């Protein structure tokens, strides 16, 4: 069982930066691949980024490639997402999630554990 708590969201102007954190409970955090997803009003939840359990490999949605960076510190049971050059279309609730398959999965149904989400709002 893994419990996830996101933090770091907020209001930022276009072109600005934010760093999201996701703190996980449980001793098995280092065995899970982690992902970030987002959901804008009226839209489905979409994949943003994922990272393997070791942190060695990452995957990004095309819409954020080159602007967002996912990373993790297994010793702190935490995964991060640095978001730079933010755009108004990045506005959404951001969720972190864990999958026990250790896959860089873009399918949200493969993630068994989810946080409550953190709001990111980018003003133009």
Image: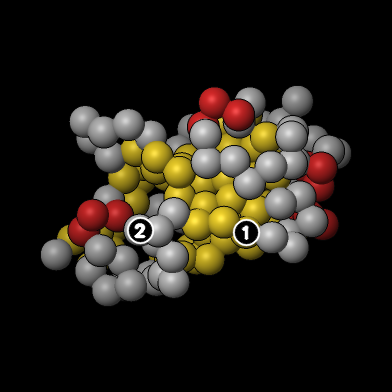
The image quadrant of residue 83 is bottom left
> Residue 59, relative to residue 116: is it above or below?
below
Query: Would you say residue 99 is visible in this rendering?
Result: yes
The image quadrant of residue 98 is top right
Q: Residues within 10 Å of mark 1 (few under 14, many from 20)?
A: some
Residue 50 in percent (x, y) is at 59, 50
Residue 114 in percent (x, y) is at 56, 31
Query: Would you say residue 121 is visible in this rendering?
Result: no
Q: Is residue 46 left or right of residue 102?
A: left
In the picture, the quarter occupied by the N terminus is top right
Disc 1 vs disc 2: Cβ atoms closer than 8 Å? no
Q: Is residue 120 left or right of residue 56?
A: left
* Earlier residue among tags 1 and 2: 1
Residue 63: assigned label: 2
Q: Residue at x 67, y 35 (%)?
A: 99
> Residue 52, relative to residue 102: is it above or below?
below
Label 1 and label 2: CA atoms lie apart by 15 Å
Residue extending furthest toward the left: 124
Q: How many marks?
A: 2
Q: Nearer the viewer, residue 65 or 8?
A: 65
Q: Is residue 110 left or right of residue 107?
A: right
Q: Is residue 50 left or right of residue 123?
A: right
Q: Residue at x 57, y 61 (%)?
A: 70
Residue 105: assigned label: none
The structure's colour scheme is secondary structure
Residue 58: assigned label: 1
Q: Residue at x 27, y 51 (%)?
A: 91
Residue 45 in percent (x, y) is at 38, 34
Residue 37 in percent (x, y) is at 46, 43
In the picture, the quarter occupied by the C terminus is bottom left
Q: Residues within 10 Å of mark 2 (few under 14, many from 20)?
A: few
Check disc 1 and report its element: helix, strand or loop. Answer: strand
């Amino acid at each position: 069982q893994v419990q996830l708590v996101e933090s770091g969201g907020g209001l930022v102007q276009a072109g600005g930066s934010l760093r999201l954190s996701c703190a996980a409970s449980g001793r098995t955090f280092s065995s899970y691949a982690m992902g970030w997803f987002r959901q804008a009003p009226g839209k489905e939840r979409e994949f943003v980024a994922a990272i393997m359990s070791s942190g060695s490999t990452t995957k990004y949605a095309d819409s954020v490639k080159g602007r967002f960076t996912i990373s993790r510190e297994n010793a702190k049971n935490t995964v991060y997402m640095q978001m730079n050059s933010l755009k108004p279309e990045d506005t959404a609730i951001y969720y972190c999630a864990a999958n026990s398959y250790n896959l860089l999965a873009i399918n949200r149904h493969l993630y068994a554990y989810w946080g409550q989400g953190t709001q990111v709002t980018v003003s133009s």
